[in-house]
Structure formats: C-alpha cells, structure tokens
Amino acid sequence: MPAPKLSKSSLSNAIAALKEQGLTPSRINLNPDGSFIIDIAVAATSQDVPQSGSKGPKKWGAKR
C-alpha cells in the first residue's frame, strides 16, 4: 500500500478544528509518510505572570 499523500484540505481541516476549540497551533511537523503533528501553544495563566506589585527577589546585599 502506498504512503498517504498530505493534502492541503486535510491540514487546513485540522487547523480549523483546533481554532474552533479555542486552541492555537504553534508548530506543524510534516512527515515524509504523509502524516503531520500539530503542536499547541500554551497560554500563560495568571499564576505564570508576575504581578506588578509582587515582592520579587531581594537585590544582592539588600537588608532583609
């Protein structure tokens, strides 16, 4: 059985389905056998983003 061919419609359908679910594709790996892998971007959560008033690390030599 020959290897499946990658088509523009199959790739665009996969990307459209991801976007419909609110996901953001970040990278697409096209394989020689006709398959593909789509990596999804991970959005930063509020826990990942430092707050503007947060007490970050002390400067070197600063008193505690």
Image (cartoon, rainbow, N blue to C red):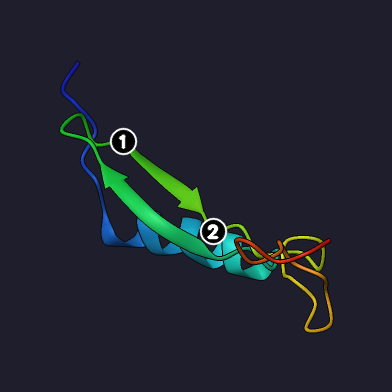
Give the position of the C terminus as an image quadrant.
Answer: bottom right
Q: x%, y% of residue 23?
A: 63, 63
Q: Is residue 38 left or right of residue 43?
A: left
- Nearest the viewer among 61 and 13 is 61
> What numbered label is drawn on residue 14?
none
Q: Are marks 1 and 2 in contact (CB under 8 Å)?
A: no
Relative image position of residue 28 (x, y in whole percent): 34, 52
Q: In the image, is residue 39 above or below residue 50?
A: above
Q: The disc labelled 1 sits on which kind of residue?
A: Ser
| Residue in the picture at 29% in, 45% down | 29
Sequence-first tag of 1 and 2: 1
Residue 24 quadrant: bottom right
Viewport quadrant of the N terminus: top left
28 sits left or right of 31 in the view: right
- What SS does tag 2 mark? loop
51 sits left or right of 25 in the view = right
Q: Residue furthest bottom?
A: 52
How far across and how far down the image is residue 4, in percent? 24, 33
User: Where 4 sits versus 59, above or below?
Assistant: above
Q: Which numbered disc, 1 or 2, marks the residue closer to the eye?
A: 2
Instruction: Name the kind of residue labelled 2 in the image.
Output: Ala
Question: Looking at this view, is 62 or 26 the one in front?
Answer: 62
Residue receiving disc 2:
41
Which residue is farthest top?
1
Q: Is 21 or 25 nearer to us in this picture?
A: 25
6 versus 47 height, above or below: above
**Residue holding disc 1:** 35
Name the side, left or right, on which 18 lies relative to 47: left
**Secondary structure beneath disc 1?**
loop
At 81% from the left and 68% from the top, the residue drawn is 46
Residue 61, picture quadrant: bottom right
